[in-house]
Image (spheres, grey):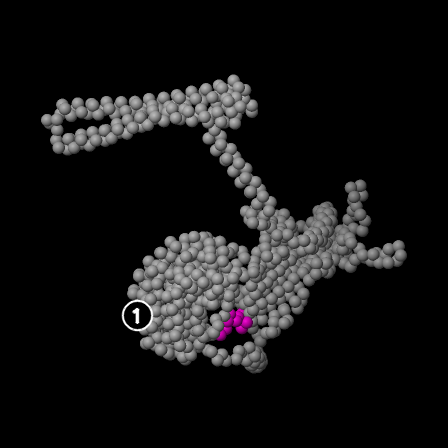
């Protein structure tokens, strides 16, 4: 490995101090609970007296392991005096030295999110807050346990890696903690020069070239002129590209950080996952501070001193002159990786983790109860600064509006001019999921999940005032009218439909200006009625059940001009469609006085010149039908306007009084569900106690025969006493008879066996004789036991009878009648 610049530190003194600390570890752990200079900053917030004994002292196996580590460290310092001391036995939160491998404890928590490396890394990066190393060029003196980190939610990069590696090992990954060197930005968690991962970059979709397509028309332009034009465009593009490159160069110079004087010396800790387990295809690093995966050849990692897991410890012997790009992670190669314990898997260390699991079984349950997945961030919130962006994360139910994530994009590097604000919500009663506000245009875009009123999917608007520019998208499959989109302008409205039975897919409405209305004092009064219609255009898809000449493709209601235009679908072998135009009559007809109709009120174009023209009666009926359709369309447009006002009114009310949805299974927040559950549990407990008391009540069967009376007479009480004593006496007699019957049966069977033996004694084999002797021994044993049981039963039967009589006399239901 490359020899790094030597840091001024007295290694021999450090080793002596570690030896003294280990000799006095018992006294130190006791004094630490009161006043210990090695005690961490936030120790006063945690009751260390409740920690298991294994945190405060070392077992004989751990002491042996520490001695091995010290011996290894002395040899390492002697052979490589210019390399930094290894992190082998730092102090834990109780001031006791612990070998780094024993601090790792494979843990699988009962959360599905923590079963993948992505979920574990995201959790650790959000759950903990960074405490930078001080000094940044030396490993830390303390390495805290996962229990401590769960309670304090603060630690160094080594603590981050310890917790993450423990979770990954528990999830089945081949994970290791890595102690090495990294760039300043990674060590200090400075992401101000990185792009926010939530800012998706627009990707240009390649145009698909169809195999069979219509050939384009022949280009008749001059080839010379085209080449001249292309040359001029190329020159202009080159000039523009040069300007862009110059601007990018200046931008990079402005963003470039000053050189780091400690480059290559800053200590950092991260996690290595080797391929093999959990179908991991190749090795990769995980930065625990950000939760992101990085390649093992990433330039941010400048070198590796050592790696360890819960079984062994390895020292890197490879050259890190070019970082980790050419490093080999075959831990079985003793030339490139020097192991501390014998064997690549450290079999001698396996006994210690097993022992620790037994000693810390209660602590495992404590670790799982130290946090909730919802409030994973310290204080319930976390802020991350990116390049021209700021990301804020909040725990669910922390804010009253349900906000969980806010991403603010800026147009300048100093992040003083916000351009876009995107917010994500959860558990909103109005089903709001995402809101985006573009500061430059003041446009707001809201997205809703399925289930809200009017099946609203998204809403794009500038202001909530009706009859202004806006766009609403709907879940068309959840609406009876199949509405998918509604785009509204001050004097226009366009609606798009999907999967309608009448095949309509488009409606465009043009409104006129409102008529000014003046009040009694000649003051203008705003008109709240429907805006006057000028034009309505409806388009329909092809209905294959009808001929193309009878299937309407478009109908236009020119309300202001009293005209109606109907266009039909084009036939497959035609280039133009058929159409009909109508002029509405001036008079208003009814059933008594029908509309007056003249041939000049209808004009028709037929594609087929040999087709017979339509008769006047057909045209008249069609005109009447279209006039009724115009009335229906006007009514639908009015309903659309009312729906827009209703949606806006509901949204204003929802934003003024925001409500969050709480599941009935979330008893911690749902007060009603919690009270109901407690009432059910209390009722079930009372019923169970009553049932147990009823089962233990020896008078319950006899009282049931009397109808369970509340008050007993003296005669009934005496009868109960006599019946209860008689029942016990009969039970005692039956038991004695049962034991006597078994005794007599065993005795008779033994006598029969003995008689059989006397008859067949001379012809029996050795096996038959052994079997006979074994049977006799067992039979004598059973007879002896039955004789003892019968004798004991005869001795205890009078005592049980007297005890029951005394209990009956003391029973509160019979005591007043028996004394």
Does the stretch in magenta take in 188? yes
Point out residue 155 in the picture as x, y percentages from the top left corner.
48, 65
Type of secondary structure dominating the magenta stretch: loop
Seen at 48% across and 23% down, the residue is: 702
Seen at 25% across and 25% down, the residue is: 746
Does the stretch in magenta take in 736? no
Which image quarter is the N terminus in? bottom left
Relative to 293, residue 486 above or below: above
Front-most of residues 563 and 41: 41
Front-most of residues 776 and 241: 776
Point out residue 52 in the picture as x, y percentages from the top left corner.
43, 56
Point out residue 339 in the picture as x, y percentages from the top left corner.
32, 68
Point out residue 671 in the picture as x, y percentages from the top left corner.
60, 47
Indicate the quadrant where residue 312 lies.
bottom left
Highlighted magenta segment, given as a residue range: 184-195
Relative to 758, residue 554 above or below: below
**Which residue does the numbered mark 1 point to in the structure image?**
334
Q: Is residue 730 left or right of residue 421?
A: left
Indicate the quadrant where residue 244 lies.
bottom right
Tag 1: Cα neighbours inside 10 Å, few (<14), some, or many (≥20)? Answer: some
Seen at 64% across and 50% down, the residue is: 453
Front-most of residues 408 and 500: 408
Seen at 48% across and 19% down, the residue is: 719
Relative to 74, residue 494 above or below: above
């Amino acid at each position: 490995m490359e020899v790094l610049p030597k840091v001024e530190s007295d290694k021999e003194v450090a080793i002596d101090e570690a030896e003294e600390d280990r000799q006095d570890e018992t006294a130190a752990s006791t004094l630490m609970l009161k006043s210990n200079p090695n005690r961490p900053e936030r120790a006063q917030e945690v009751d260390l007296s409740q920690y298991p004994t294994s945190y405060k002292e070392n077992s004989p196996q751990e002491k042996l392991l520490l001695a091995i580590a010290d011996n290894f460290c002395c040899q390492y310092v002697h052979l490589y005096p210019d390399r930094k001391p290894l992190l082998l036995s730092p102090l834990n939160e109780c001031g006791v030295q612990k070998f780094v491998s024993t601090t790792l404890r494979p843990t699988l928590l009962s959360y599905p999110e923590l079963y993948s490396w992505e979920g574990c890394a995201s959790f650790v990066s959000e759950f903990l807050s960074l405490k930078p190393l001080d000094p940044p060029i030396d490993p830390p003196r303390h390495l805290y346990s996962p229990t401590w980190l769960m309670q304090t939610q603060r630690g160094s990069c080594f603590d981050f890696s310890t917790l993450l590696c423990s979770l990954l090992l528990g999830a089945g990954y081949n994970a290791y903690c890595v102690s090495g060197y990294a760039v300043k930005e990674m060590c200090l968690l400075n992401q101000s020069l990185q792009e926010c991962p939530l800012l998706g970059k627009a990707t240009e979709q390649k145009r698909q070239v169809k195999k069979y397509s219509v050939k384009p028309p022949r280009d008749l332009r001059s080839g010379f002129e085209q080449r001249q034009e292309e040359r001029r465009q190329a020159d202009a593009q080159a000039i523009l590209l040069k300007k862009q490159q110059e601007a990018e160069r200046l931008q990079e110079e402005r963003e470039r950080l000053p050189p780091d004087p400690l480059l290559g010396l800053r200590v950092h800790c991260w996690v290595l996952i080797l391929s093999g387990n959990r179908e991991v295809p190749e090795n990769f690093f995980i930065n625990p501070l950000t939760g992101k995966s990085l390649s093992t050849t990433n330039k941010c990692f400048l070198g590796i001193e050592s790696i360890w897991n819960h079984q062994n410890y390895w020292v890197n012997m490879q050259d890190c002159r070019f970082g980790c790009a050419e490093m080999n992670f075959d831990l079985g190669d003793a030339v490139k990786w020097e192991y501390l314990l014998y064997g690549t898997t450290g079999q001698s260390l396996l006994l210690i983790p097993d022992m620790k699991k037994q000693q810390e079984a209660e602590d495992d349950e404590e670790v799982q109860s130290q946090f909730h997945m919802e409030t994973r961030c310290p204080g319930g919130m976390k802020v991350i600064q990116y390049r021209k962006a700021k990301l804020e994360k909040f725990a669910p139910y922390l804010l009253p509006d349900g906000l969980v994530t806010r991403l603010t994009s800026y147009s300048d590097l100093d992040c003083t001019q916000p351009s876009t604000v995107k917010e994500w919500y959860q558990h909103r009663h109005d089903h709001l999921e995402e809101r985006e506000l573009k500061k430059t245009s003041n446009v707001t875009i809201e997205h809703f999940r399925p289930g809200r009123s009017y099946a609203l999917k998204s809403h794009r608007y500038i202001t909530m005032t009706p009859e202004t520019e806006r766009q609403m998208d709907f879940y068309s499959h959840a609406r009876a009218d199949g509405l998918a989109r509604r785009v509204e302008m001050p004097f226009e409205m366009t609606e798009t439909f999907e999967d309608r039975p009448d095949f309509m897919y488009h409606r465009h409405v043009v409104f006129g200006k409102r008529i000014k209305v003046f009040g009694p004092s000649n003051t203008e009064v705003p008109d709240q009625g429907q805006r006057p219609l000028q034009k309505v255009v409806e388009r329909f898809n092809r209905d294959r059940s009808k001929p193309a000449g009878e299937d309407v493709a478009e109908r236009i209601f020119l309300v202001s001009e009293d005209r109606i235009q109907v266009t039909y679908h084009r036939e497959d072998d035609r280039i133009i469609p058929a159409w009909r135009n109508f002029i509405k009559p001036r008079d208003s007809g009814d059933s008594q006085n029908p509309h007056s109709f003249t041939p000049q009120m209808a004009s028709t174009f037929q594609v087929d010149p040999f087709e017979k023209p339509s008769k006047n009666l057909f045209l008249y009926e069609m005109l009447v039908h279209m006039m009724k359709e115009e009335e229906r369309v006007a009514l639908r447009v009015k309903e659309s306007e009312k729906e827009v006002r209703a949606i806006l009114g509901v949204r204003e009310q929802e934003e003024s009084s925001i409500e969050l949805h709480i599941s009935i299974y979330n008893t911690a927040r749902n007060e009603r569900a919690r009270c109901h559950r407690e009432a059910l549990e209390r009722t079930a407990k009372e019923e169970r106690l009553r049932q147990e008391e009823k089962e233990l009540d020896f008078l319950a069967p006899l009282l049931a025969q009397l109808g369970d009376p509340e008050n007993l007479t003296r005669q009934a009480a005496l009868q109960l006493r006599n019946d209860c004593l008689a029942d016990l006496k009969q039970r005692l007699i039956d038991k004695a008879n049962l034991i006597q019957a078994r005794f007599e049966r065993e005795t008779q069977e033994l006598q029969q066996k003995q008689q059989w033996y006397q008859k067949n004694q001379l012809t029996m084999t050795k096996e038959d004789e052994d079997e006979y002797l074994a049977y006799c021994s067992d039979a004598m044993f059973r007879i002896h036991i039955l004789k003892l049981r019968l004798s004991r039963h005869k001795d205890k039967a009078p005592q049980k009878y007297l005890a029951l009589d005394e209990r009956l006399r003391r029973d509160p239901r019979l005591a007043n009648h028996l004394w």
